[in-house]
Image (cartoon, helix red, strand yellow):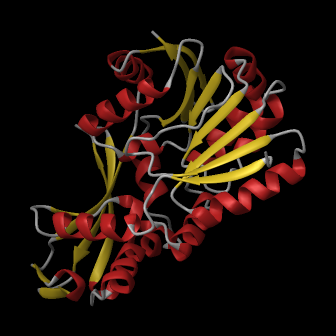
Amino acid sequence: MSPFQISRTLPEDATDAALRADVLRGLTTTPKTLPPKWFYDARGSELFERITELPEYYPTRAEREILVDRAGDIARAADARTLVELGSGSSEKTRLLLDALTGLHTYVPVDVSESALAQAGHALIAERPGLDVHALIADFTKEVALPGTPGPRLLAFLGGTIGNLLPSERAVFLGSLRALLSPGDTLLLGTDLVKDEETLVRAYDDAAGVTALFNKNVLAVVNRELGADFDPGAFDHVALWDARNEWIEMRLRSRAEQTVKIPALGLAVDFAPGEELRTEVSAKFREDGVRAELAAAGLELTHWWTDGAGRFALSLSTVR
């Protein structure tokens, strides 16, 4: 068997069907919403890479700091022979775990992007001749069937992406992760932590305006894929802290009364002056809350690591 293989669990047209469903549902409800996963076409991914390098945007650096300092501790606690990573993308941060997991046999990156999986997979087997890479083209927010691989398995969900799910969605999602795990397996979860409002808002509304471009890119995606006529210049980028729910919201605020046509859906969407379209929720967490949510899903938090400034956390959990 080749040390690198890709399996597809998503139909070829799944992305188009999901976009159509999300746009139709999101733009015909009140308030209007679009899921953040549609930021990430090639242009959006490039913009996000720029965001991670901005002085205001701390999560990527903070998580990497933890991995640099604690990858050995994580590896010893997990003792995994298989590493499964959800939303793996370029698998860049994962290399720190791969280096530390000395008994690793197989790496299973899971992502919707076949090109990202192929590029990362070929690079990894070139760097690590003894490693098997079995990439999975799948939507990890749906039911995922993992390939048969040797255990114990370490399931990694990094980047704080768990925060993009609403509490009810997180409960379902964590339950689905628990269903993938067997006794002896572990879950490594990245969570951004609650901190002062100014730091949080600046991370999502940087001085250079890169996050504003990233936010408006979702309109360009809908224009290109569904023939819509959104004018990104007719919307303002908004980032705000919801203290009650302890999450950041990104929104696009209509500058004037306007109607947007989406021919592929036979849809015309009216926006009032000042009306907002929510494009992202990014929840921030506290250790007790993470522990409780994991416990409700049948997982026990056993290790908790933060960066030196206490901005971000990685937690390791086992099956209860």
Direction from residue 235 to residue 39 in the image, left or right: right
Estimate the x, y position of residue 247 in percent, counting from the top left.
33, 43
Estimate the x, y position of residue 303 in percent, counting from the top left.
58, 16
Estimate the x, y position of residue 286 in percent, counting from the top left.
41, 26
Direction from residue 23 to residue 187 in the image, left or right: right
Give the residue drawn at x 54%, y 12%: 183
Give the residue drawn at x 19%, y 80%: 265
Give the residue drawn at x 55%, y 64%: 48
**Nearer the observer, 288 or 14:** 14
**Nearer the observer, 54 or 121:** 121
Give the residue drawn at x 73%, y 45%: 133
Quadrant where the N terminus sits is top right
- Give the vertical position of 57 relative to 142 (above or below): below
Quadrant where the C terminus sits is top left
Estimate the x, y position of residue 224 in percent, counting from the top left.
39, 85
Q: Residue pushed farthest top?
A: 320
* Camera sees residue 58: no
Direction from residue 1 to residue 297 in the image, left or right: left
- Give the vertical position of 300 relative to 41 (above or below): above
- Give the vertical position of 30 relative to 3 (above or below): below
Tell me where residue 284 sits by quadrant. top left
